[in-house]
Image (cartoon, helix red, strand yellow):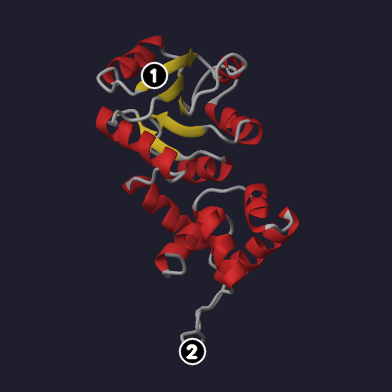
Amino acid sequence: MNPQTLKVAIADDHQIFRSGVMLSLKPYSHIKFVLEASNGQELIEGLEKEIPDIILLDLRMPGMDGIETTKYLNKHYPQIRILILTMFEDERFVGHLMDSGANGYLLKSTDPEEIVQAFNDVMENGFYLNNFVNRVLIKKNYAKQKFSPNLNSELTVTDKEKEVLSLVCMEFTAQEIAQRMNISPRTVEAIKDRLMERFGVKNSVGLVFFAVKNSLIE
């Protein structure tokens, strides 16, 4: 069975680089580029005609850059997976972009095989976490811990908290979780806030890492 066709957009201000990426992925017949743009504004205008599954997004572009574009897309097109593809190997960018809604962070030196793996992971799991991103996010979330570990206390979660935690790890939004559990979005957010405070993390990414590390979900 052939893999399901993935519709991909690319936004980068260098035409030669865009063409190179598209050419390098041409052997993968299930990947179809449906949109290319030279900056964020051009990309957003193109989304009025075609909605891709995944966007490969550069950071430094004239006009609307990749950071602004990521935040806009996360707010207005949350169903689109965003993969940053940039030359900036800077930990500060990784953490900020992931917090802003990016689903993965790749360097422009990445080979085509890894880009395809990133496509598969973000479609299946919601995130692509390579070694570089893992290292940054783990360091970032450990630095934010604000609780003092107590080895005498058992780490437990209620069934409802565990269900919310599992759905967060599967990248469902608060609204989607509320619909699945037949509770209000406000209740979902309250449970997430309670878990983040208990675990000493600041965001959903932190919840995911904590849950996996401590085997709180199957």
User: Quick one: 62 or 180, which is closer to the camera?
Assistant: 180
Measured as percent of width and height from the top left, residue 198 is found at 59, 72
Q: Residue at x 66, y 64 (%)?
A: 191
Q: Position of residue 142 (x, y in %)?
A: 47, 63
Name the side, left or right, on which 165 lies relative to 216: right
Secondary element at image label 1: strand
User: Mark 1 highlights which residue?
Assistant: 32
Q: Is residue 193 left or right of residue 9?
A: right
Q: Residue at x 49, y 33 (%)?
A: 82
Q: What is the CA distance from the residue labelled 2 to the residue labelled 1?
A: 54 Å
The residue at which mark 2 appears reads as: 152
Tell me if label 2 and label 1 are in contact, CB under 8 Å. no
> What amino acid type should be assigned to the residue bearing mark 2?
Asn
Quadrant in which the N terminus is drawn: top left
| Above or below, comparing residue 16 to residue 2 in the picture | above
Quarter of the image for residue 64 reads top right
Crowd class of label 2 (few under 14; some 14 to 19; many from 20; radius 10 Å)? few
